[in-house]
Amino acid sequence: RGSLVPPVRTVAIEVISDAENQLTAAACVLMTQGEKVRRARAVWLRREAPPQSSEWGEVKVEDYNPNAEEAPKVFMSEDAETLTQHLGETLELLDADILLTYELPETLSRLLGKKGVAKPGSALARGLCRRLTSELKL
């Protein structure tokens, strides 16, 4: 007979910011209690836009195996705000019970940027807090 309590979902996250406290890079991984494989791994990088190419990129077809670890996903943008929004949306989708980081105040400071605030209803506020009308301040 199975437990009525859902497994605990833990997201480990680390964030790097520049001298102006804008997101430069972030990485996260999701682990679910009772499972040995990591369910989600992602990296966000802020970088210059690559030169435009008229050639087609390579297309890969992969077989999905639900028992295998997922390959890490990489998201790149030249805009820190776009990366922060995408990171917030990802955290919201992962719906972690526990947020694990080396130093929580520093990580939140890097995520919240110069203003130190995530407005109510923003992707980042929804990703970090289950109270949808909460404003997060540091």
Image (spheres, grey):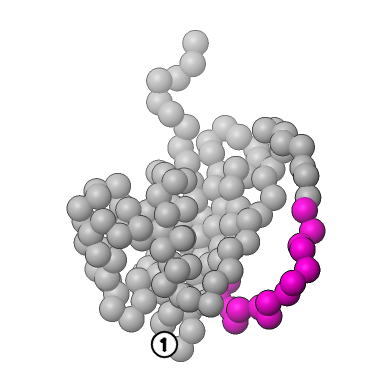
The percent position of residue 61, horizontal first and vertical second, equals 78, 44
Residue 106 appears in view: no
| Residue, far top | 1
What amino acid does circle 1 point to?
Glu
Q: Is residue 121 left or right of residue 127?
A: left
Residue extent of the magenta highlight: 45-59
Please, is residue 118 above or below residue 21 in the view? above
The percent position of residue 122, horizontal first and vertical second, equals 30, 60
Residue 12 appears in view: yes
Q: Residue at x 77, y 42 (%)?
A: 62
The percent position of residue 74, horizontal first and vertical second, equals 62, 61
Please, is residue 65 above or below residue 131 in the view? above
| Badge count | 1
Instruction: Tell me, yes or no, whether the highlighted magenta stretch contains residue 50.
Output: yes
Q: Residue at x 62, y 44 (%)?
A: 38
Q: Is residue 114 left or right of residue 24?
A: left
Q: Which residue is mark 1?
A: 20
Q: Residue at x 67, y 45 (%)?
A: 70
